[in-house]
Image (cartoon, grey):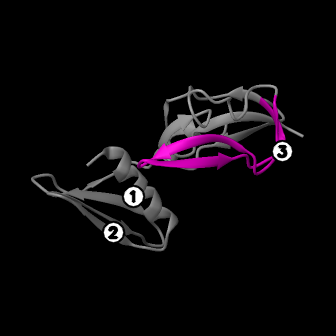
């Protein structure tokens, strides 16, 4: 099973009230469960059928690289990836870009597409502003919480 699918399942589990999910694809199976207590942050576990044992999976949102950039721009706003997937800056290779540096965007405007598990997800701006910088290359993989665009808020 593709690791991107497993990461997406973990994200879906963390965003929902479900405590456990098990998926079977042919001879492969994945079981993901969340154990929580008041004093310990929830951890996700992945158990793959076969000789491997259940092991903790690192959460991508916990690393320093996805923390807000404090020195990027004093009045800057980051549009961040809401999921793991592949970043596309236009609806198709022969179509114009959704946005680029210098262009105005309004909250709700589509700024890119992230392909996750063969589904094309339109990503919308979460604030009004002018695009200062595109933080990801077209066709590059992105992680949850990764900066996609830097805006100067209007």
Q: Is residue 12 left or right of residue 133?
A: left
Q: Is residue 88 left or right of residue 96?
A: left
What segment is highlighted magenta in the picture? 103-131
Disc 3 crowd, CA 10 A, few/some/many (<14, 14-19, 20+): some
> Residue 28: which quarter of the image?
bottom left
Residue that badge 2 annotates: 21
Q: CA distance from mark 2 to mark 1?
A: 8 Å
Mark 2 vs mark 1: which is more N-terminal? 1
Identify the disc placed on residue 83. none
Identify the disc placed on residue 9. 1
Disc 2 crowd, CA 10 A, few/some/many (<14, 14-19, 20+): some
**What percent of the width, then of the height, locates residue 27?**
14, 57
User: Would you place residue 89 above or below residue 82 in this image?
Assistant: above
User: Would you place residue 13 above or below residue 123 in this image?
Assistant: below
Assign a secondary structure to mark 3. Answer: loop
Q: Is residue 29 left or right of residue 14?
A: left
Residue at the (78%, 35%) spot, across then down:
151
Assign a secondary structure to mark 2. Answer: strand
Q: CA distance from mark 3 to mark 1?
A: 31 Å
The answer to if 115 sits in the magenta stretch is: yes
């Amino acid at each position: 099973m593709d690791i991107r699918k497993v990461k997406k399942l973990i994200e879906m589990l963390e965003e929902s009230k479900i405590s456990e999910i098990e998926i079977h694809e042919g001879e492969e199976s994945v079981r993901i469960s969340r154990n929580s207590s008041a004093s310990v942050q929830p951890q996700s576990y992945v158990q793959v059928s076969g000789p491997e044992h259940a092991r903790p999976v690192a959460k991508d949102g916990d690393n320093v690289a996805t923390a807000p950039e404090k020195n990027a721009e004093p009045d800057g706003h980051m549009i961040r990836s809401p999921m793991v997937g592949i970043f596309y800056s236009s609806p198709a290779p022969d179509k114009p870009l959704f946005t680029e540096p210098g262009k105005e965007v309004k909250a709700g405007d589509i700024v890119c597409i992230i392909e996750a598990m063969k589904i094309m997800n339109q990503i919308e701006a979460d604030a009004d502003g002018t695009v200062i910088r595109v933080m990801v290359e077209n066709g590059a993989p992105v992680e949850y919480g990764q900066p996609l665009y830097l805006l100067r808020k209007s």
